């Protein structure tokens, strides 16, 4: 009975190919990162968790750093944040910041813990590591801003990128400081006291100049 079950498991492992196999490897790498952290994660430990040989990993990722970064991308892409559509930019931003901070607080904590290890191992600057970690990540706000532009609430042609990213930069900062979702009153401060006045000013100023 045991032999038959072992043979069945081996056949199941051998049948994994392409995207299915890669997803299994990245899921194993992410779980290993969560449970043991960057320092103790190895190509061998991920292979054991994924029930495959370490050579299978090296054929896809040449080293641990590339595997960890790929696992971070995999988790972010397979656990998307729900994008609200309330009909107004203000309410969309309040809903998005609230949902995103609650959904991403553990994700941010894990990435932060891995960040120093990636810095030391890769020899890159913090900005370069951040770029690698965030590359190819979906932009939460793109649809929200596009809809607001179409409704005439804002003019994306005149708003600096730094203004558009500011709410999310503040959200990440607060999460890094507390490892907790940002509270509702902080969300309102970011949206009502900082973000909305800035985008309104830029849009109004642009409209005045065009007239």
Image: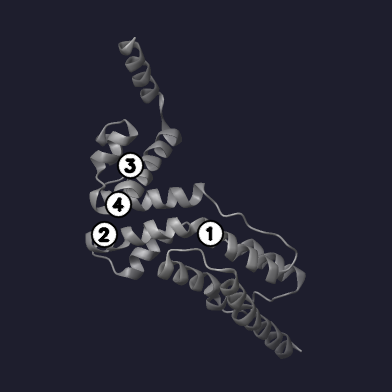
From the image, tell me which residue sits under label 4: 37
Q: Earlier in the sequence, mark 2 or mark 1?
A: 1
Residue 16 lies, with reference to residue 76, above or below; the image says above
Q: Secondary structure at mark 4?
A: helix
Position in image of residue 108 (x %, y %): 42, 60
Q: Earlier in the sequence, mark 3 or mark 2?
A: 3
Mark 1 vs mark 4, CA separation in Å? 22 Å
Q: Earlier in the sequence, mark 1 or mark 4?
A: 4
Q: Quadrant of residue 159?
A: bottom right
The scheme the figure's colours follow is: one colour
From the image, tell me which residue sits under label 3: 60
From the image, tell me which residue sits under label 1: 102
Position in image of residue 7 (x %, y %): 33, 15
Q: Secondary structure at mark 1?
A: helix
Q: Residues within 10 Å of mark 4 (few under 14, many from 20)?
A: some
Q: Residues within 10 Å of mark 2 (few under 14, many from 20)?
A: some
């Amino acid at each position: 009975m045991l032999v038959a079950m072992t043979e069945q498991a081996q056949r199941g492992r051998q049948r994994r190919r392409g995207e299915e196999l890669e997803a299994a490897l990245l899921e194993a790498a992410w779980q290993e990162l969560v449970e043991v952290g960057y320092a103790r994660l190895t190509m061998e430990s991920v292979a054991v968790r994924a029930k495959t040989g370490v050579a299978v990993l090296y054929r896809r990722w040449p080293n641990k750093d590339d595997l960890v970064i790929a696992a971070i991308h995999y988790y972010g892409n397979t656990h998307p944040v729900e994008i609200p559509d309330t009909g107004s930019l203000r309410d969309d931003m309040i809903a998005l910041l609230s949902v995103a901070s609650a959904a991403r607080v553990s994700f941010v904590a894990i990435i932060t813990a891995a960040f120093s290890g990636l810095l030391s191992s890769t020899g890159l600057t913090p900005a370069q590591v951040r770029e690698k970690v965030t590359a190819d990540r979906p932009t939460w706000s793109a649809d929200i801003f596009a809809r607001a532009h179409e409704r005439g609430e804002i003019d994306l042609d005149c708003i600096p990128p730094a203004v558009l990213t500011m709410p999310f930069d503040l959200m990440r900062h607060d999460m890094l400081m507390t490892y907790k979702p940002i509270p509702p009153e902080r969300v309102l401060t970011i949206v009502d006291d900082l973000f909305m006045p800035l985008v309104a000013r830029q849009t109004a100023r642009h409209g005045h100049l065009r007239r």
